[in-house]
Image (cartoon, rainbow, N blue to C red):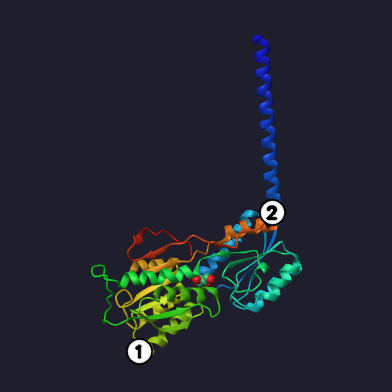
Amino acid sequence: MRITDSGNQDMTRRNISFFLFIILCLLFFSCEKKAAETKGIILGFSQIGAESAWRNCNTRSVQEAAAEAGIQLLFFNAEQKQENQIKAIRSFIAYQVDVIAFVPIVTDGWENVLEEAKEAGIPVLVCDREINIQDESLYAGYLGTNMLVQGRSSAEFLIKKYINPDTGKFFTRRNQPVRIVELRGTEGSSPAIMRARGFREALAEYPEFEIIYSESGDFLRSKGYELMCNILEDNIVFDVLYSHNDGMTLGAIEAMKERGIKTDEDIVIVSIDAEQAAINALIRGDINCVVECNPKQGPEIIRLSQLLAKGETIPRMIFMIEEVFTEWDDVLNIGTRGY
Ligand code: AHR
């Protein structure tokens, strides 16, 4: 009896090992198959340009993630022109790529080309900037950052900054409303629209703040510099600079410093992006608050493209994780940004 029992036990053990082996083989081959499936993907990516260090990091992130995943990337730089982006998307359709991803320079005007992509059966992923479109079935989903929240966070910093912690009342230097100068991003782009809207929404209940000047600097450092030169030449007196990106902020700071303004004492500055140069300015005291806009979207763009290429659906909106860095934080320990 004992001999037969141990014989049965041996058989059972061998059977279990065999089944485990088969399961492992199946798992291994299905993983290999998936990797092989996604390796053959062709992704057409239309980038808007190279207007900022943020944008260059965004481009690098996509290129590196595609190379790592073994995905063929057709990359087009639109040099800040919507018509170039539309041409690029049409060429992706003609090339019959598996997925199209694009960063829309502005929110409007995408209907026709996206209908063409839909007719060709090519899924479209909208990246970084949002679009404004009636028929939402014309794109599969959006991956980017929450720009409305970025605008709100900028205002929330100011509210905290100007509230007297002892009395709960606002204090300003002249006992007058806090005068804000706003440098907006590219006209008609979702970051410019949302960052302006979120900022105003958060300040709506606070008459202590007044936006006395608002102009588009196109997300360019050179225009930030130029606009600030004009403001100072026109003797516009202000307390706060709210700028939609670090490039414009750094240009404006340069203009102020050239005219002897002590940016670390005289002006409160809130900037968006969190480039290394802006974090360095926060450490120096030239900037008071930096709201992060995370450009490292490449790995997520590639993951979503792989899902779309397999015919899967993706969430409508995915936002990157972001932080707010202020003068009250341990600024020396923010770490290096990589852009
Ligand atoms: O769309 C994101 C914005 O575009 C970034 O804030 C800005 O720096 C970039 O050029």
| Helix, strand or loop for disc 1 | loop
From this view, report whether residue 32 is shown above or below residue 228: above
Q: Does the residue labelled 2 lie within 8 Å of ligand 1?
A: no
Residue beneath the point at 68% across and 49% down = 35
Front one among 236 and 254: 236
Residue 166 lies in what quarter of the image?
A: bottom left
State the CA–CA distance, disc 2 to disc 1. 59 Å
Q: Where is residue 32 in the image (x, y as percent from the top left)?
A: 69, 45
Secondary element under disc 2, as helix, strand or loop, is: helix
Relative image position of residue 101 (x, y in whole percent): 64, 66
Between disc 2 and disc 1, whose residue precedes? 2
**Left-right relation of 281 to 79:** left
Residue 314: % across, % down? 63, 58
Name the amino acid, label 1. Answer: Asn
Give the left or right position of residue 251, taking residue 17 as reference.
left
Q: Mark 1 points at which residue?
A: 235
Q: Quadrant of residue 128?
A: bottom right
Q: Image quadrant for the N terminus?
A: top right
Q: Which amino acid does label 2 sit on?
A: Lys
Whether residue 223 is situated above or below residue 63 in the rendered picture = below
Residue 7 higher or lower than 227, as above or below? above
Q: Which one is in front, 240 or 109?
A: 109
Residue at (68% x, 69% y) in the render? 138
Kindly identify which numbered label has been placed on residue 39: 2
Displayed quadrant of residue 78: bottom right
Tell me what residue is drawn at x 26 percent, y 81 percent.
175
In this view, the residue farthest toward the front is 205
How crowded pointer 2 is (Cα within 10 Å; few <14, some 14-19, many 20+) is rated as some
Q: Is residue 286 visible?
A: no
